[in-house]
Image (cartoon, rainbow, N blue to C red):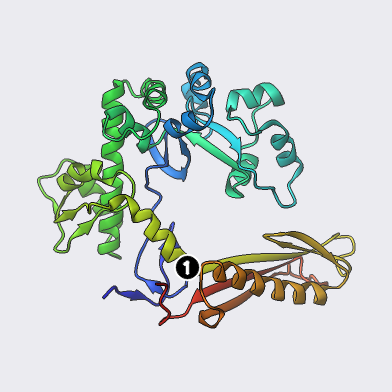
Amino acid sequence: VPELCEKGAIVGGWQTHVKAIKMESSANGGDSHIWFKKCIRVGPRRVIPLCFAAVNYPNFKEKLEKNPIPLRTMLNEHIQPTKFFVRTGVMPINPSEGERKLLEVIGSEPLSIYEILNKMKRFPAPAVLDSLLNQRVVHAIGFTPTDALHVLGEYTEWDVEAAQIGARKLSRFTQMGVHAFCKKVKKQVATNMAYSLMSFIMEGRGKDGIKMMLEEEVPAQYKVNIPIVLLGGPVKAYYEELKALIDAEIIVPEQARVGNAVGALVGKGIKRIEITIRPYSMENPDQNFLVFTPLGRKKFEQYRTAVEYSQKAGEELILDSMKDFGLPESSIKIDTSIEYLVPPGWKQTPMETKMTFVGVCTPGFSMD
């Protein structure tokens, strides 16, 4: 029987506080961004793999080939010879002036940072780009572990040539050949997998020591007495690397590739929504309020009315979303928390009210 965690699963380093199976996620997957700044870096952001982008955007491969190689001193997460940006179709909520200007440039075809520079006459502010990525208004495209596997011939679902172009460009910074570079990426991903696993198993016992043992050449190896099951995507490709790091029974099920679908199914049992209330104008903060929901924004004359609407809208959005997955309303429990932003000495209505709604499928309900 899986162990339950009263404090909630840890997702991306954050404690969810939603009672769940004891689990932890890490930013380490086939779509983790591989980039270079003094060394090869994995993540933490996820990007669309080059090999996949080449299949979906007809002229992408030519753009990738022609994209300039930045100076080493310019390199950062966004300035990479293999990094591109494209609109997702999601509309931003209350975008800033900087976001609006950048969205006038980025469209439905991938653009490199240099193409954005040519159109805007300056590099986009990293904070603006990060904001649009976090809102999922813009998607990033870049080199990934999936691309590395394409180059190595271990997983060739999409465009191998695009992956090779990307590997060739990035490997120039490493003084490695293309093949050696991709092997290095693969090994680093496997090491990250082992690190996440051992940190989870040995919770509270010092992550630095775990990292040192996995990354340095030492005549010792972790032994795990329970099976390790690999699920999702081309996990079979990492079997040997993981086996070299951890002494354990490592199982790759025949249907390992459907593992991501299992995660999606489990995710249907939890839904989280945030609604924010702000004064329309700080010059007159006690009249007229804006309510921002996933559906857009609405304006109200009174704060009380805005709060009442938000409470009702949040609960309805949770119920509608979870019922779409076949969950009966009687099985759904909704918890609401409210945070107020009130600076010292502030006597008006809150500068910001954030209402968080978490819907959970109550135990005992079967999703079969």
**Quarter occupied by the C terminus:** bottom left
Q: Residues within 10 Å of mark 1 (few under 14, many from 20)?
A: few
Q: Position of residue 52 (x, y in %)?
A: 45, 34
Q: Amino acid at mark 1?
A: Thr
Residue located at (70% from left, 59% from top): 295
Q: Is 249 or 355 nearer to us in this picture?
A: 249
The residue nearer to you, when weighing 136 against 97, is: 136
Q: Is residue 20 left or right of residue 62?
A: left
Question: In this rendering, is residue 336 above or below 216?
Answer: below
Residue 310 vertical position relative to residue 76 in the rendered view, above or below? below
Say left or right for 168 vs 187. Answer: right
- Asked which secondary structure carries label 1, the reply is loop
| Residue 339 visible to an observer of this rendering | no
The residue that label 1 is drawn on is: 16
Q: Position of residue 289 (x, y in %)?
A: 83, 65
Q: Position of residue 298 (x, y in %)?
A: 80, 62
Residue 368 in view here: yes
| Quadrant in which the N terminus is drawn | bottom left
Q: Nearer the viewer, residue 32 or 343?
A: 32
Q: Residue at x 31, y 42 (%)?
A: 189
Residue 180 is drawn in which quadrant? top left
